[in-house]
Amino acid sequence: MPASHRRTAAFAVTLAALLGATASAARAVPPAPADDPRDMPRAQCRTAVVGSTGTARCFNPNGTISRVRLHIECSRWYDPDVDTRAVPVGPAGQITVAGRCWQEIEDLWVSQDPG
């Protein structure tokens, strides 16, 4: 076997061994826990506005509890904004949260905290 073929074969064997060691080391390290609240599992919510009433319907497909709050911003300056209390949604649970303004609704959104 010529010297160039021996060097190529030795390089291939060394590279394969190195890649195998790297792959096994990568598998041995557990993934880091999700510290960012945005990475935590959340309930899936849909919002709707009918007249002066705002509604959020939430379903939690996760195995953890999620606490859901509905926030409503009213259009008129004299109309107080609405923030509901946190409602827990258990695993595979479904809830409806509603609130209303005296007049029109400017905006509404849902916030969640892990339970």
Image: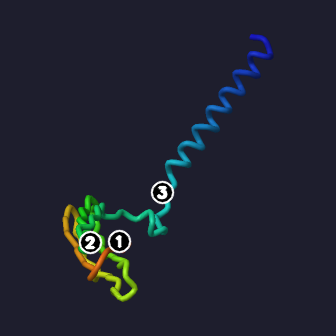
For the residue carrying disc 3, how many other residues have a C-alpha within 10 Å: few (<14), some (14-19), or many (20+)? few
Q: CA distance from mark 2 to mark 3?
A: 43 Å
Q: Earlier in the sequence, mark 1 or mark 3?
A: 3
Of 15 and 33, which appears nearest the observer? 33
Q: Position of residue 106 (x, y in %)?
A: 37, 73
Rendering quarter of residue 1: top right
**Residue sitting at 33 percent across and 86 percent down?**
79
The answer to whether residue 17 is left or right of residue 62 is right
Q: Which mark is residue 54?
A: 2
- Amino acid bearing label 2: Gly
In contact (CB < 8 Å): disc 2 and disc 3:
no
Provide the residue designation for mark 3. Answer: 30
**Residue sitting at 76 percent across and 22 percent down?**
7
In contact (CB < 8 Å): disc 2 and disc 1:
yes
Provide the residue designation for mark 1. Answer: 108
Q: Earlier in the sequence, mark 2 or mark 3?
A: 3
For the residue carrying disc 1, how many other residues have a C-alpha within 10 Å: few (<14), some (14-19), or many (20+)? many
Q: Earlier in the sequence, mark 2 or mark 1?
A: 2
Q: Position of residue 92 (x, y in %)?
A: 20, 61
**Residue sitting at 24 percent across and 62 percent down?**
59
**Residue sitting at 23 percent across and 65 percent down?**
57
Q: Secondary structure at mark 3?
A: loop
Q: CA distance from mark 2 to mark 1?
A: 7 Å
- Amino acid bearing label 1: Leu
Compared with residue 85, is residue 50 higher up or lower down, i.e. above or below?
Answer: above
Q: CA distance from mark 1 to mark 3?
A: 39 Å
Of 1 and 90, which appears nearest the observer? 90
Q: Position of residue 8 (x, y in %)?
A: 73, 21
For the residue carrying disc 2, how many other residues have a C-alpha within 10 Å: few (<14), some (14-19), or many (20+)? many
